[in-house]
Image (cartoon, helix red, strand yellow):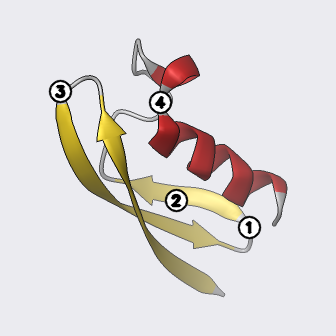
Amino acid sequence: MEIEKYLSGYCRMLDAPRLVEVLLEDGNLTEVDCCYGSCPHQTSCPIATQIDDLLKNK
């Protein structure tokens, strides 16, 4: 089953607030419209934290 989520937060890469679309299929991340996974600011990113929480609570 595919789940579509929209997460909002501050993006340090863009230095602006951001709305990010996240697609999960059977609990696995299939698509995200930001640099999640390769962003140099991921450890301090509120959006990445929300994505991590989604993946932990599959």
Among numbered discs 4 and 3, the one appearing first in the sequence: 3
Q: Is residue 37 left or right of residue 40?
A: right
Query: In the rendered image, which residue does mark 3 sit on?
Result: 15
Query: In the rendered image, which residue does mark 2 sit on?
Result: 30
Would you call the spot at circle 1 few (<14 residues within 10 Å), some (14-19), or many (20 or more)?
A: some
Work out which residue is located at the far right of the displayed protein and give it: 57
Q: Nearer the viewer, mark 4 or mark 2?
A: 4
The residue under the point 29% across, 24% down is 12
The residue under the point 81% across, 66% down is 58
Which dot marks residue 4? Answer: none
Helix, strand or loop at mark 1: loop
Name the spot of residue 42 as percent of width and height, x first.
Answer: 49, 23
Amino acid, disc 4: Cys
Among numbered discs 3 and 2, the one appearing first in the sequence: 3
Amino acid, disc 2: Thr
The residue nearer to you, when weighing 44 against 28, is 44
Helix, strand or loop at mark 2: strand
CA separation, marks 4 and 2? 20 Å
Query: In the rendered image, which residue does mark 4 sit on?
Result: 45
Among numbered discs 4 and 1, the one appearing first in the sequence: 1
The residue nearer to you, when weighing 49 against 24, is 49
Would you call the spot at circle 2 few (<14 residues within 10 Å), some (14-19), or many (20 or more)?
A: few
